[in-house]
Image: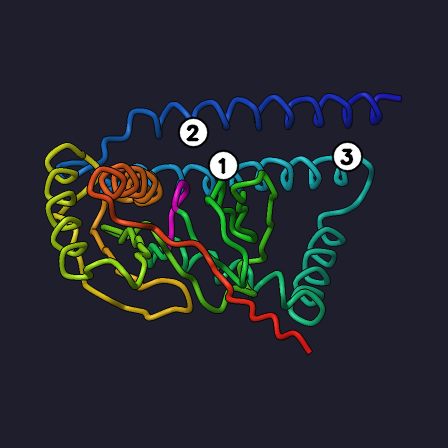
């Protein structure tokens, strides 16, 4: 009866220690300075280190708790050492993927491939990084779908939040409109947009005609934006272009098809 009580008390202590440890880690990282003069250069890095540290501390707490319970239940130190050795062999032979995931997680952290809050594409899955542990990376898509990717399976990372990101807007005009005039109108409107926007890092570049499609002449605009601001910039530019084209009488075409009817 006393052994059962001891086991229950040990489990309760582990639970409390895990919660207490989580709070301490949250407190430590909430006080961590980041930025150019800080210990860590980015807020995302702080969040990533916090999630990894939390997972490691909780694992250690519960691992010690399990060993204490086994010891109280009569398992000798020699047996525990033998079990630990067996576990090590099992990890080496049958759990290589787990070891691979952990090693990959360490490299992700050290090399700063991505941080919590970054928008990335991993193994064909695109989303915002919610957490990074030693084994897995958790992504959430725009529609709310959650992807949990083992770190060891990550082969290529497309990080859309490094320093800057480009907004790309393709505009179609009809073949009847003057392309040179449309380009000049776009350049003028883009200069106004840059003066009124805080998400752009540079004035939008009107590249010129990039496509001669079935129903439209396509003009492409590219602008360097702050991280995560590109989607908003694209939406704002499309709205501005639509209003300006309406005012200038420039037609944004829609697909048309000519049908000939031949009477037999």
Q: Assess disc 2: are there few (<14), some (14-19) or many (≥20) residues with their C-alpha within 10 Å of its C-alpha.
A: some
What residue is shown at x 22% (from left), y 39% (from top)? 244
Outermost residue on the right side: it is 1
Residue 125 has which mark? none
What residue is shown at x 23% (from left), y 35% (from top)? 34
Q: Are marks 1 and 2 in contact (CB under 8 Å)?
A: yes
In the image, taking residue 104 as reference, residue 14 lies left or right, namely right
Q: Could you tell me which quadrant the C terminus lies in?
A: bottom right
Name the residue that disc number 3 marks: 72
> Who is closer to the viewer here, 231 or 118?
231
In the image, taking residue 112 as reference, residue 5 lies left or right, namely right
Name the residue that disc number 2 marks: 25
> Who is closer to the viewer here, 242 or 66?
242
Closer to the N terminus: mark 1 or mark 2?
2
Distance from disc 1 to disc 3, alpha carbons, whole Å, reads 27 Å
Q: Assess disc 3: are there few (<14), some (14-19) or many (≥20) residues with their C-alpha within 10 Å of its C-alpha.
A: some
Was residue 117 drawn as part of the magenta stretch in this picture? yes
Name the residue that disc number 1 marks: 54
* SS assignment at label 1: helix
Stretch in magenta: 114-118
């Amino acid at each position: 009866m006393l052994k059962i009580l001891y086991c229950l008390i040990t489990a309760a202590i582990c639970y409390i220690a895990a919660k207490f440890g989580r709070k301490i880690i949250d407190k430590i990282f909430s006080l961590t300075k980041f930025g150019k003069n800080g210990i860590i250069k980015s807020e995302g890095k702080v969040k990533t280190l916090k999630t990894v540290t939390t997972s490691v501390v909780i694992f250690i707490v519960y691992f010690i708790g399990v060993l204490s319970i086994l010891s109280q239940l009569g398992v000798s130190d020699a047996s525990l050492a033998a079990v630990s050795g067996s576990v090590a062999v099992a990890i080496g032979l049958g759990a290589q993927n787990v070891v691979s995931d952990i090693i990959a997680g360490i490299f992700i952290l050290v090399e700063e491939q991505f941080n919590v809050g970054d928008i990335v594409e991993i193994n064909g899955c695109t989303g915002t990084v919610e957490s990074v542990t030693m084994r897995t990376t958790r992504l959430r898509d725009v529609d709310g779908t959650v992807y949990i990717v083992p770190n060891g399976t990550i082969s290529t990372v497309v990080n859309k939040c490094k320093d800057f990101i480009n907004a790309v807007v393709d505009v179609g005009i009809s073949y009847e409109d003057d392309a040179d005039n449309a380009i000049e109108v776009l350049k003028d409107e883009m200069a106004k947009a840059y003066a009124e926007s805080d998400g752009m890092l540079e004035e939008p570049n009107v590249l010129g005609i990039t496509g001669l499609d079935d129903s439209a002449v396509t003009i492409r605009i590219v602008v360097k934006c702050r991280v995560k601001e590109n989607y908003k910039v694209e939406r704002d530019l499309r709205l501005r272009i639509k209003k300006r084209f309406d005012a200038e009488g420039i037609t944004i075409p829609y697909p048309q098809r000519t049908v000939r009817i031949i009477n037999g």
